[in-house]
Image (spheres, grey):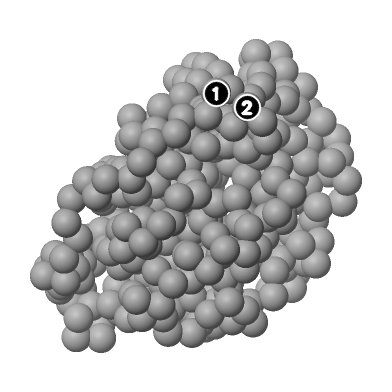
Amino acid sequence: MEQTPKTQNQTLYNAPKLYSDKWLTQLMSDCTLCPHNCHADRTLGNSGYCGSSDRLFAARAALHFWEEPCISGTNGSGTVFFSGCNLRCIFCQNHNIALGVTGKEIFLTHLSEIFLELQEKGAHNINLVTPSHYIPQICIALDKAKLQGLSIPVVYNTGSYEKPESLRYLEGLVDIYLPDLKYISSQLSQAYSHAPDYFTVASKAIEEMYRQVGKPVFDNRTGLMQKGIIVRHLLLPGQTRDSKKILRYLYETYKNDIYVSIMNQYTPMPHMAEDERLNRPVSNEEYERILHFAEMLGIENGFIQEGETAKESFIPPFDYEGL
């Protein structure tokens, strides 16, 4: 499962719509950006399930080398880790920032500057991690940065608990979608992410992502992705049956028009020590079984992980670098 570089699609940015402060206020004053539909007035400092008001917080903005090769390349991906999350996965490796415990406030003007600074540092792309609850702020910042010369691809890196109508605000701003597809089983998604409707929601979100960016496009010189989707699936210990259903769904739905990243990096965090379901890494035998199944299906466009990836050392320090 290796990528075949294709011709780069070069386009100039033209603002597809006007992202205004009024538009931002309207969305934040009665927030229904995600499937939780909290209706929180975030302009008054209230927060919904994501734990975030209309003030934007992040924990790190730096070159990141641990994404898929066509994202990280040689220079790294310009990754911005946002604080807060609209999923509460009990095994989350980034749980401190997901819960909003760690984060530094960023103003919209500065967020645009951060994007441009990452480009100046040689980043291959701008990588927005856990951005769902900040879609309006990100749209405004990206629109401004692109008009000021931001020209590298923008990656939207998400757990996929997204509403298609919210994703449509990003059309023309995002080039690459990097969504998770965590579960098919509603029992698993309820137990591990408190979201029994996860697969229904995530599959519709990925459909919208595919509608926007279509088949993958690569730079024919560097092999870096310029446009397209890489769906990530993180294997969980003891859940190979659900993983097979996910891979079958993706292949039957998209064939090889998307890339699939099959990940074995599940890391049992200290707070999971008492949970017998999740207190161990994925075994080599489990991972090999899933890779063999992917080959049997006919999946050709994909990424696999080799070596010891289940280590906390692979989790970046959320030390406000670049903010």
Query: Judging from the image, what secondary structure is the residue with disc 1 in?
Result: loop
Where does the image place residue 182, in percent across and percent down from the top left?
Answer: 54, 44
Name the residue type under label 1: Thr
Q: Which residue is mark 1?
A: 7
Quarter of the image where one finds residue 38 = bottom left
Quadrant that contains the N terminus: top right
Could you say which is closer to the camera, residue 57 or residue 109?
A: 109
Where does the image place residue 98, in percent across and percent down from the top left?
Answer: 51, 71
Can residue 96 be seen here? The reply is no
Q: Are marks 1 and 2 in contact (CB under 8 Å)?
A: yes
Where does the image place residue 55, in percent across and percent down from the top left?
Answer: 32, 81
Left or right of 204 on screen, residue 69: right
Could you say which is closer to the camera, residue 245 or residue 232?
A: 232
In the rendered image of this protein, does residue 65 appear above or below residue 54?
A: above
Left or right of 32 on screen, residue 319: right
Q: Residue at x 27, y 45 (%)?
A: 14
Q: Residue at x 48, y 46 (%)?
A: 153
Q: Residue at x 57, y 63 (%)?
A: 120
Instruction: Name the disc covering residue 220, or none.
Output: 2
Query: Judging from the image, what secondary structure is the residue with disc 2 in?
Result: loop
Could you say which is closer to the camera, residue 8 or residue 96?
A: 8
